[in-house]
Image (spheres, grey):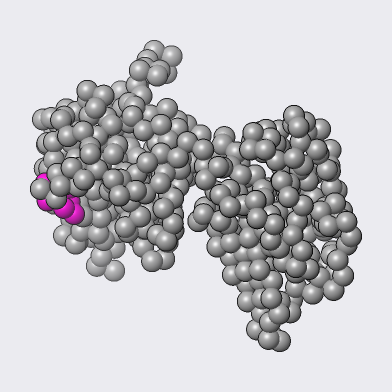
Amino acid sequence: MIEEVENRAAVTDSLARRASIRAGSAAPGGLPEAEVVALESVASGGEAARISTDIGELDRVLGGGLVSGATVLLGGDPGIGKSTLALHMASGVAHGGRGVLYVCGEESAAQVALRAERLGAHKQGIVTLSAIDTGSIIAAAQKQSPALVIVDSIQTVCSPHLDSAPGSVSQVRESASELVAAARGFGAATVFVGHVTKEGYLAGPRVLEHLVDTVLYFEGDRNHAYRILRAVKNRFGAANEIGVFEMLAGGLAEVADPSEVFLRDADRAVAGSAISCAMEGSRPMVVEVQALVAPSNPGSARRTALGVDHGRVAMLAAVMEKRLGLSMIAQDIFVNTAGGVRVADPGVDLAVMAALASSYVDRPLPPRTIIVGEAGLTGEVRPVAQLQARLKEAARLGFESAVTPAGGNAEAGGIRILEARSVSEAWSLLSGQTPSA
């Protein structure tokens, strides 16, 4: 109750401070009068307002680069490489002749310099600030007039107007709000680095996502070298766009052809392996789905999924039990996407089912065949978005045939199209016969 009262008082006080930051000064005795501007008279700046990071994959995810005055939230698990990516970003902007202010709340300036040397980063034009209070950060930004401000991390920053400790929900929200208002005032692109908690939330509860213009998640398996940067919100570009990086000893390297990377060693004719093409934003990405089906003890069957949604795998197993006659309820099921990539596209449903059925009957699927389609609960194969782009990517990689939803009117040079209206028809095309329990 006491904390709630304090938060209400802090919010009331912060509203006046934010308005003062935006307007430059507050009117005596109250808030400044807001100015009404006709939208048609406002110049957008077009592409000139974009700031290139000199990192192609990052610019792709951002929609062409950073936007002056916009705020970006970069989140991910601790140790995944967020600070490394942030330093690469600072280096790229500075290399383009623009100033960068790097606020290091978790490290000293000497530690940041040491990391920059290890990464071979361009250091000229980057200034560091070892401070955690918002007043010092805003004052430094106004004095330096940088094109980019990076706050690493937002959990370490605190507002002097609140008594709570740094990292608390109220401090994170208030600090971010003050910095967002200031960034829009002096026109610098601002990046907040935030950790994801054990519960999967960004900076505690998701109190920052509505405050910023762009939300990026840095994903990956620490046991794999590849990382995926995913946009889940972007006011200045397409959401769900991804960029792929490889973590090397000298830092992050861009992966220009992720399909080629995730398909390494996928030509092996083994049971339980299926190839599909997922759409991640505007990018088609060919992935290998691996499955293992093994007899289970009665009443204790396990369902484990890595890289795909666990609930969807359970649903697809139930559809296979009903529509293909496979006794999946008495089997342990394990599904994995090779390379540590995470796929949320329902267009890989049919590939997941094909991999499971292949493992169940212990027979490999036809080689050089790509499988694309969304499965419904009634066993139908539903159309997928941008089928033509998926098949074009498969043709580029040398695939010879494709199992696709019926009625897609898909064409791809050199690929034989096999259309399926149901999951049983798709399995018949892949195996030559419908399996029985």
Residue 191 position within the rendered picture, expressed as x and y whole percent measured from the top left: 29, 40
* Position above or below: 423 against 125: below
Would you place residue 425 above or below residue 405 in this image? below
Q: Residue at the spot x=37%, y=41% of the render?
A: 253
**Residue located at (51% from left, 54% from top):** 339
Between 132 and 1, the one nearer to me in the picture = 132
Q: Nearer the viewer, residue 218 or 161?
A: 218
78 with respect to 427 (left or right)? left
Q: Residue at x 62, y 52 (%)?
A: 266
Of 174 and 127, which appears nearest the observer? 127
Name, please, the residue furthest toward the top: 41
Residue 157 at least partly seen: yes
Quadrant for the C terminus in the image: bottom right
Residue 405 placement (x, y as % from top left)? 79, 44
In this view, the residue farthest toward the bottom is 298
Residue 337: % across, % down: 58, 57
Quick check: 151 left or right of 433?
left
Q: Quadrant of the N terminus?
A: bottom left
Numbered range of the magenta stretch: 103-109
Q: Is 109 situated above or below 92?
A: below
Q: Is residue 344 visible?
A: no
| Residue 231 colored in magenta in the image | no
Quarter holding residue 252: top left
Residue farthest along the right direction in this orientation:
433
- What is the number of callouts on the image? 0
Q: Residue at x 44, y 50 (%)?
A: 226
Q: Is residue 303 above or below residue 111?
A: below
From the viewer's perspective, tell me whether residue 266 is left or right of residue 114.
right
Expressed as whole percent of the image width and height from the top left, the position of residue 307 reads: 55, 58
- Left or right of residue 176, residue 308 in this image: right
